[in-house]
Amino acid sequence: MDKLKSKFHFEISEIKKLYTHYQKAMNGILQPNRRFKPTSSSSSKNGKSNSTVYEEKGFVVFIKKHNEYITGNFHQALQDMSSTYEQIIGLKSARDSHLQTELFTPIQNSVLKDLNYISKLKKDASEAESEVNSARKGTEKNPQDQAAVDKLSRANSNLTRAKENLQRAISTFERDEPNRINMFIQAAQIQQDFYKNAADSFSQLVANLRTIKERSSDSAYSNENTPYSAPKSNGEGLGYTTTLKEYNYSAADHKGTVETCKCRALYDFTAEADDDLSLHKGDEPTIIEQVDDQWYYGELNGKRGHFPVEFVEKI
């Protein structure tokens, strides 16, 4: 019974940590300027592409970290939540890829290219007009100077040609306006699809959570007189008797046996709990131990704690 109570209190402690830092983690999504800013894909020194990190990534890491030590219906609820936010990350990635193809790339390769060409033609026309004014002054000083007259004639021809080129480019650009508007239509449709699919994902999450809530309520009612009784083999209820892996959660007392190595932070990571280790992009902490496939335990500037595996690369 004492062992069972110990596991119960361990899980309650983990749940308390989850709720203590939940608002801060959620604000990473609601107020993305605070942390986990999206970064464009780039290639690391080993040639591997670093995928974009969206605000939801930090929240998923936060949920998964704490959910590792939680069991039963609450564990399933958190698992469904993290899965939904991972879906949102995928939807955002697809949205951004389509926007790049349908809007951003055409703007760079076509629209801005055409506008830059028009700007160049405007400059040519302005310079041609200045040449005409200069040549006209020469003929005013000496109307009989044939060279000055010829120079003015050439300047007028150049100006006429420059204006025609400019007008032709402007007309072509104006005729292409429907295509430019269509780019915005496609971009709006891409956004519309994203929000529709995101809404569908959250609708499914709501349905899943309601089902889990009902199952949890039924389990709580059937076990209300036996708070420390072992749950049934079907895993329903709070499940506090589920075997928890041996793990010392205190960063101060953490002892690793794995050979240490250096790594470099690819993104900023803000500590969510006392035993986390905050990192700034470019920091080079020492990995003391790999806790699991999601978390390292390491040291930086004399401080020790946990940080996500996906936020660093070994060097």
Image: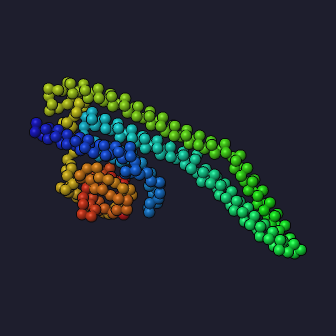
- Quadrant position of the C terminus in the picture: bottom left
Above or below, 235 relative to 25: above
**Lateral position of residue 152 relative to residue 228, left or right:** right
Horizontal and vertical percent for residue 254? Answer: 20, 55
**Lateral position of residue 41 relative to residue 239, left or right:** right
Horizontal and vertical percent for residue 90? Answer: 45, 43
Q: Tell me if I can see residue 160 in this picture.
A: yes
Above or below, 94 relative to 157: above
Q: Could you say which quadrant of the image residue 144 lies in?
A: bottom right
- Quadrant position of the N terminus in the picture: top left
Horizontal and vertical percent for residue 24? Answer: 31, 46
Badge count? 0
* Residue at left offset 70%, top offset 59%: 122
Q: Could you say which quadrant of the image residue 206 lies in?
A: top left
Q: Nearer the viewer, residue 121 or 261?
A: 121
Q: Tell me if I can see residue 66 in this picture.
A: no
* Residue at left offset 43%, top offset 51%: 38
Above or below, 217 relative to 250: above
